[in-house]
C-alpha cells in the first residue's frame, strides 16, 4: 500500500504537478520568516544604502562605504544589544552573501566594501581613527 502511494506521488510530481499550500499557511510562513530574520531586521533598522545598481560608476567615489568586517561587527553588536546570544548569528559566509544581495559592493585589493552607512542614531566608530558616520550623536 505504501509503495503504491509513493509510485502515484512520483507520477504526480513527474508530470509537473504541485500542491499549493492554502493562503493562510503562506501568509503565516512569510510572517514567521520575517520575524525570525534578524539580519534583515538589522539591515532595516541600522543600515542605509548609499548607492545602488543605478548609481553611475563615476559617482561611486563620493558614496560612503563600510568594509565587510565593519558591517559584520555592527551586526554582532546589534544582535547583542537586542538581547540575543551569538548562537543566533548567521554565519559569516551567509552574512556576506546576504549583504551582497542587499547592497552594492566593490572589492578593491580583496577587501569587500559595501556602499552603505549607519543610519543616524546608529553606533559610533568601531575602528580607532575612523570618523563617526554623518548624524552620529553620542548623547
Image (cartoon, rainbow, N blue to C red):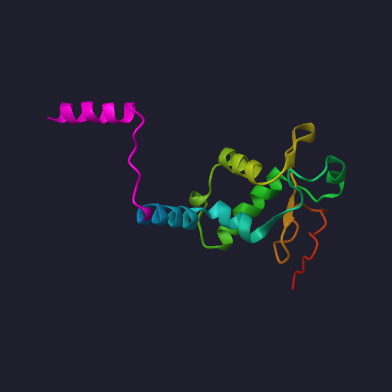
Vertical position of residue 92 compared to residue 24: above or below: above
Q: Is residue 70 left or right of 24 when viewed as pictured?
A: right
Q: Is residue 25 magenta?
A: no
Name the residue: 35% across, 44% down: 20
Q: Is residue 19 magenta?
A: yes
Name the residue: 73% across, 51% down: 116
Q: In terms of depth relative to the viewer, which is nearer, 84 or 44?
A: 44
Dominant secondary structure (helix, strand or loop) of the stretch shown in magenta: helix
Vertical position of residue 95 compared to residue 138: above or below: above
Read off the magenta span.
1-23
Q: Is residue 27 left or right of 129 when viewed as pictured?
A: left
State the residue lying farthest toward the bottom: 139
- In x, y percent, where is residue 5? 19, 31
Q: In terms of depth relative to the viewer, which is nearer, 23 or 46?
A: 23
Vertical position of residue 76 compared to residue 136: above or below: above
Task: Please say whether residue 77 is visible from this viewpoint.
Answer: no
Name the residue: 56% across, 40% down: 94
Vertical position of residue 7 compared to residue 33: above or below: above
Which of the 4 image quadrants contains residue 120?
A: bottom right
For the N terminus, give its image quadrant. Answer: top left
Q: Is residue 93 left or right of 114 when viewed as pictured?
A: left
Task: Please say whether residue 18 is visible from this viewpoint.
Answer: yes
- In x, y percent, where is residue 33? 46, 52
Name the residue: 74% across, 73% down: 139
- In x, y percent, where is residue 69? 69, 44
Amino acid at each position: 500500500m505504501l509503495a503504491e502511494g509513493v509510485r502515484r506521488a512520483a507520477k504526480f510530481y513527474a508530470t509537473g504537478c504541485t500542491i499549493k499550500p492554502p493562503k493562510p499557511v503562506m501568509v503565516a510562513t512569510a510572517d514567521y520568516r520575517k520575524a525570525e530574520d534578524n539580519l534583515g531586521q538589522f539591515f532595516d533598522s541600522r543600515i542605509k544604502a548609499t548607492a545602488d545598481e543605478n548609481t553611475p560608476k563615476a559617482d561611486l567615489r563620493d558614496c560612503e562605504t563600510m568594509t565587510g568586517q565593519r558591517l559584520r561587527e555592527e551586526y554582532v553588536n546589534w544582535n547583542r544589544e537586542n538581547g540575543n546570544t551569538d548562537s543566533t548569528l548567521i554565519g559569516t559566509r551567509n552574512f556576506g552573501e546576504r549583504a551582497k544581495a542587499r547592497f552594492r559592493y566593490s572589492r578593491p585589493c580583496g577587501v569587500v566594501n559595501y556602499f552603505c552607512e549607519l543610519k543616524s542614531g546608529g553606533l559610533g566608530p568601531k575602528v580607532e581613527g575612523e570618523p563617526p558616520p554623518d548624524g552620529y550623536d553620542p548623547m
